Image: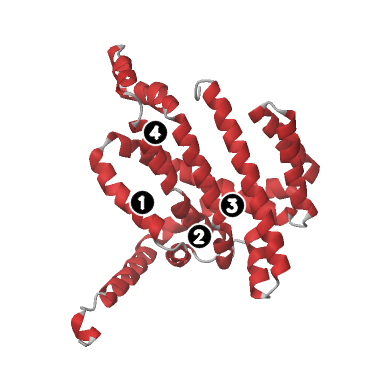
Amino acid sequence: MADAASLFPDWRSPLRDGTNQLIDALVVGYGDAFERVSDGLLGLLVAIEQALRGAPPWVMLAATGALALAASRRWAFAALTTAAVWLIGALGQWDQAMQTLALVLVSVAVALALGLPAGVLCARSRGVRRVTLPLLDLIQTIPSFVYLIPAAMLFGLGKVPAILATVIYAAPPLVRLTDLGIRQVSAEAVEAARAFGATRRQLLLKVQIPLSLPSIMQGINQTTMMALAMVVIASMIGARGVGETVLVGLQRNDPGTGLVGGLVIVILAIVLDRLLQAGGTRLQDRGGPP
């Protein structure tokens, strides 16, 4: 049998060393820029987290019910959604759930700000799509733990690297489904808009996005669910929240604590999923965004 060392070239060392040198160069050359980004994200997260944790639970329950009713126009749906959120408090995870919710809201907002324009660019340019789709394949294939290493090196431990790792992990479905939805808009509708003198901006905002709204809403839904799936992993670098409860259960060999944290994450996922679906359906019934 041929010796493996003589059969295969050593590509591991150049890849490893090159990656480390790139991260070191980014830290040295752009440390101030990363610090400004970190301060901005942290300020936004802290503001949302303080608002959620500082509000009395009954206010949050009432707001959940009102939001569910506005999204669905069904009292039964609003009551069930409110009861599900109440169950989080009954499980003793209210404060942790508000921390996790704040992290998810900021992560999804950043993913929307980056993913929607990227999806539009992919839909409008074959060249951009050819570069972007393999990159998305790579992002979705690499284990999510790997995202934490450069994020922690660039921004330190805490909530900011957790946000960025979550965005990298959760944004690809939004980019893909935005691209797919816009490209599937019928050529007849596009040609009719152009015949009436619509500009590229008007074509995008008045025709392509409204007609591709079901696909975009599905992308937002998947991005939100993947952001929630990342919270346990993000707790390993100090993100806290419900993920920390699961992590503590794992570290202490306490399956009961882990189950409590897992149930709370499931409840949050179900509530957010149903709210997004109901809101997306109502938005589509109204004919898209104003």
Amino acid tagged 4: Gly
Q: Does any portion of residue 193 appear in the rendered image?
A: yes
For the residues bearing labels 1 and 4, Cβ distance under 8 angstroms:
no
Residue lying farthest to the top in this orientation: 196
Amino acid tagged 2: Pro
Looking at marks 2 and 4 on the same chain, the residue that comes earlier in the sequence is marked by 2
Residue depth check, mark 2 versus mark 4: number of the one nearer the observer = 4
Secondary structure type for disc 1: helix
Q: Nearer the viewer, residue 170 or 281?
A: 281
Secondary structure type for disc 4: helix
Amino acid tagged 1: Leu
Tell me, for residue 181, which label it has, or none. Answer: 4
Tell me, for residue 161, which label it has, or none. Answer: 2
The Cα–Cα distance between marks 2 and 4, rounded to whole angstroms, is: 31 Å
Q: Residue at x 42, y 56 (%)?
A: 33
Looking at marks 1 and 3 on the same chain, the residue that comes earlier in the sequence is marked by 3
